[in-house]
Image (cartoon, rainbow, N blue to C red):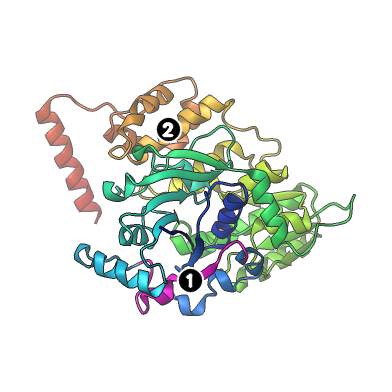
Amino acid sequence: MRTTQIFYASTLYGATTLAAALDSGCFGPADRRLLLVGNNAAVPETTPALDAMPGFERLRGRFDEVLSWNEAISPLHPAGWTPRADDVPLLERHLRLLWGLGDDRIELALESVQVAPALTIARLFPEAALDVYADGLMSYGPTRNKIDPLVGDRVRRLLHLDLVPGLAPLLLGEFGPTAEVVETEAFTKVVAELADSAGPAAGEEGPALLLGQYLAALSLLTPAEEEELHVRMVRGAIARGHRRLVFKPHPTAPDAWTRRLAREAEALGAELTVLDRPVLAEVVYREQRPALVVGCFSTALMTAHAFYGIPVARVGTRTLLERLTPFQNSNRVPATLVDVLVPDLEESGAPASLPDEEALKGLVAAVGFAMQPRIRPDLRGAAVAHLSGPLAERTRHCFKRRRLTVLGLPGGLPVPRHPRVRRLARRALKLKRALAK
């Protein structure tokens, strides 16, 4: 029986990770390797798909064919469509005919399997072996949704980049897959393929690179607050002595923001260039070798530090931790990691919050349990140990007191034990909420 491996990717970062995994031997032999490309933009028709982005052609040779998930399910949107259980056998047969799979044994490699479209693809091939590759820093957090065991129990491996050396991902840990690191050298080699140059001349100092994320689109900040966040990046980088700045905006961010940044830099005696090419931040590291990378909580901060040895700094991460709602927001662990591992741009020489690897593991386990206590009840002991330990005060800002109270964790408010008192407290809380509306 023939074996066909299907790799699903929606971003160039994901495709680069897959290419590195293939180059480092993470996948066994197969008769065919197909790359299934998805475009999850709100309006896919107005946004270039992965296979239309600069540099993709240099990755294409690793696959026998490139397919489009959007075309396969058109006119439905990839992020909004899930099949009815009764329709799965018919739809699987349709896809096998459409993609020429016949009776092949299918192996799937998917991203973000807790949500559509990856979850949808996993359901449409119920007999397929399943590997998941991690989406940046989010892999260190718990699974955001409870996954059907018919999908979760099929996950054999979680492939991830070693963004935080020594730290194991929590993602899908409730199903016990093997966590396997994709070789850093393989990843940087693939990035080198995507780059147009090998970097500036020896001895020439690179610019300070400022990373925009467009957090306003996620309702985490207002547009005005995010614009001010970028201005703080400019001021902070210049205060550290950098006179050449490069701003890498999010592709959907307003152009007006970049114009204000250029004016601010000029007023402070520096020059700011806007990078308008849709390339990976890691490609910019290769091409320009920045002297400093500044961001809020981007995964690219960790690749800069861990993979390229570039100094990094954060801005606004503490504010973002306070704003994230609900508490189980999947950005919480990435923001927490950047907050405790990356120095603050505006506090020169600010040390990391945690002294060692074990302390970091304890913090991530505690945040993971507080986020998803029903999915990861096994982390409660680690959460109690951290929150009652010597580092609890230094990391208290990573938690909400109300969340700790609800879960009965150290650091929460004392809860009356008598049932009648507790009922009265709940009624008072409901009344307070009603009056606030």
Q: Nearer the viewer, residue 368 or 168?
A: 168
For the N terminus, the image quarter is bottom left
Query: Residue 417, how many percent across, how many down?
Result: 17, 24
Q: Nearer the viewer, residue 131 or 160?
A: 131
Q: Nearer the viewer, residue 122 or 164?
A: 122
Helix, strand, or loop for circle 2?
Answer: helix
- Going from N to C along the chain, the mark reached first, 2 or 1, is 1
Q: Is residue 222 magenta?
A: no
State if disc 1 and disc 2 touch (CB < 8 Å): no
Task: List the residue tagged with mark 2.
Answer: 365
Q: Residue at x 33, y 68 (%)?
A: 80
Q: Nearer the viewer, residue 226 or 309?
A: 309
Q: Residue 219 is drawn in which quadrant?
A: bottom left
Task: List the residue tagged with mark 1.
Answer: 67
Q: Which residues are magenta?
A: 61-79
> Within 10 Å of the Cα at label 1, are there few (<14), some (14-19), or many (20+) other Cα atoms?
some
Q: Is residue 314 visible?
A: no
Query: Residue 355, how many percent across, how many down?
Result: 59, 25
Q: Amino acid at mark 2?
A: Ala
Q: Amino acid at mark 1?
A: Leu
